[in-house]
Image (tube, coloured by chain):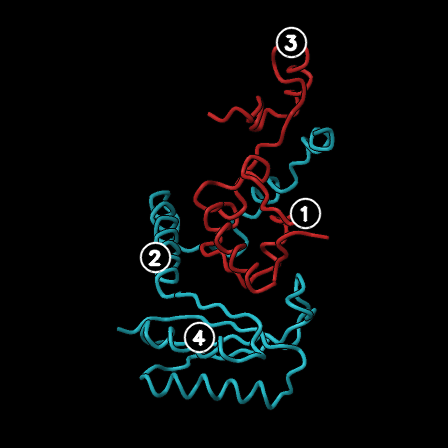
Amino acid sequence: MNGRKTAGGGARGRGGRAQGKGDTQQRRPMFRRRKVCKFCAEKIDDINYKDTKLLMPFVPERAKILPRRISGTCALHQRKLRIAIMRARQLALIPHTSE
Amino acid sequence: MNRKYELVYVVSPDATEEQVAELHGQVEAVVQRMGGQIEKTENWGRRRLAYEIGRHKEGIYVLDVITGSGELMKEIDRRLKVFDIVIRQLIVRVDEAETVAERKRTKRTEALRRRRVARGLPPDRQPGEGQRAEFEDDRDDRFDLAEDLR
């Protein structure tokens, strides 16, 4: 389903690594952790602009919003996250840029 | 037409406590006059701003939860803009987002209960149940090495 999901995600994982290296070259040589939307996993229903602790991990160093392809957030939650971050920025709870 | 709004305003750090109280009094007066109600007031106190606004590096944050009409909020917004000591303000309508979140939450718990009943379990989680599987999931450190290489 998901291109990033590599083989052996389930209980068979431990053996999967060596096998993946051995049998074919066109397979991705190393594993990537399958990314899961943080808000789906932790069942956070509303992403609040006041909750800076929740938002800060999504605005790394340069204070740009972390893209979905890196954070793994689902589309719905990324949209809500963006709104929350923009509101928090307006109140100077979160920076627009650093420096 | 009663809607629920959140109003957050940032007051300049030079303002005295009386000034902040007076400002809050003003907001309250407007709310009362236009048939609204203040449900909750929170003073977050002095906080560092994430970026400088004008020459300020700190601000005093005040949060009000207000129910009332859109006109009321418009009026408050207009009035707050007039004060020099208010350096930022934000008004957000929250009632819809709250009901959506609430609906989602009840839907989820209901689905969970239904699934549990279908499996022949009591609808609520028993103490000490299901801990094991969760624990194993958390300790899944097989891919940590690969993550460092990324």
**Residue occupied by mark 2:** B103
- Decide which of B26, B111 is in the foreground and name it: B26
Neighbour tally class for label 2: few under 14, some 14-19, many 20 plus, Cα within 10 Å:
few
Kindly state the secondary structure of the residue where label 4 is placed: strand
Kindly state the secondary structure of the residue where label 1 is placed: loop
Give the residue furthest to the left. B1
Q: What residue appears at the point 52 percent right and 50 percent down from the top-left corner?
A: A42
**Residue occupied by mark 1:** A62
Neighbour tally class for label 1: few under 14, some 14-19, many 20 plus, Cα within 10 Å:
few
Question: Type of residue at label 2?
Answer: Arg
Alpha carbons under labels 2 and 4: distance apart = 21 Å
Tell me, yes or no, whether dots 4 and 1 are on the same chain: no
Alpha carbons under labels 3 and 1: distance apart = 37 Å
Q: Chain of mark 3?
A: A
Alpha carbons under labels 3 and 4: distance apart = 60 Å
Q: Are marks 4 and 1 in contact (CB under 8 Å)?
A: no
Q: Colour of chain A?
A: red
Return the mark for residue B55. none
Comparing marks 1 and 2, which lies closer to the viewer?
1
Q: Is residue B112 above or below residue B9?
A: above
Q: Chain of mark 4?
A: B
